[in-house]
Image (cartoon, rainbow, N blue to C red):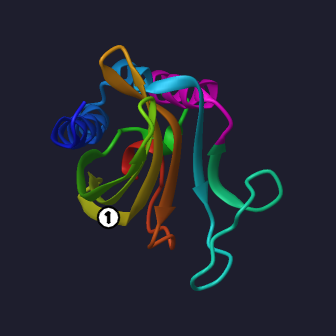
Amino acid sequence: MNDFELTRSVHDFLYREGEYLDQQRWDEWLALFDPEAEYWIPAWDGEHELTADPMREMSLMYYRNRSGLEDRIFRLRTGRSSASVPLPRTTHLVSNIRIGGFDGSQCQVTASWVVFSFKDKQSHQFNGRYEYVLAAQGGDWVIKRKKIIVNNEVIPSLMDIYSI
């Protein structure tokens, strides 16, 4: 895969992830994650310092593998997340996508993001940075690790997987 093909495929993959969340295509979104994928949203430990260890420090959300995400989707689908009923309408915007390195099987990727959310006649937005480890699999990518840095963590409304 040349640099152009690599860049295009990674961009398409990240845009697709946002599209699946916006359209509540939960099964397709979950399929983007490796079964052992780590999903982590660290908390801010100071004005410019994030927590570094999800096992010992506060996190806004942490799932050691995809089963945590699967449980979250089950709760959304069955209405067992009362704060998420009804689900908001969302728009994920992803930009400044950078590929830090590709060893032929995995790549490090960072991106900036903004998610706009509308529910109960109110709009909210979260923004920040994504840090991914993506693995090549069957001509596409799979998420091995996703770290989500939320810049505006003072939460005016519910923050969930669809709002970040």
Q: Is residue 32 magenta?
A: no
Q: Quadrant of the N terminus?
A: top left
Residue placed at 63% from the left, 71% from the top? 50
* Magenta span of residues: 63-78
In the foreground, 89 or 23: 23
Q: Is residue 74 magenta?
A: yes
In this view, the residue farthest toward the right is 56
Q: Residues within 10 Å of mark 1 (few under 14, many from 20)?
A: some
Q: Secondary structure at mark 1?
A: strand
Residue 32 percent location from the top left of the image? 40, 26
Badge count? 1
Q: x%, y% of residue 54?
A: 73, 53
Residue under label 1, please give it. 125
| Camera-side residue of 118 and 133 | 133
Can you name the residue that lies furthest to the bottom here? 47
Q: Amino acid at mark 1?
A: Gln
Q: Is residue 14 left or right of residue 5?
A: right
Q: Position of residue 95 (x, y in %)?
A: 23, 58
Height in image: 134 above or below 141? below
Q: Quadrant of residue 123?
A: bottom left
Residue 62 at what x, y percent from top left?
65, 46
What residue sits 46% from the left and 53% below the top?
131
Tell me which secondary structure the magenta stretch mostly adopts.
helix
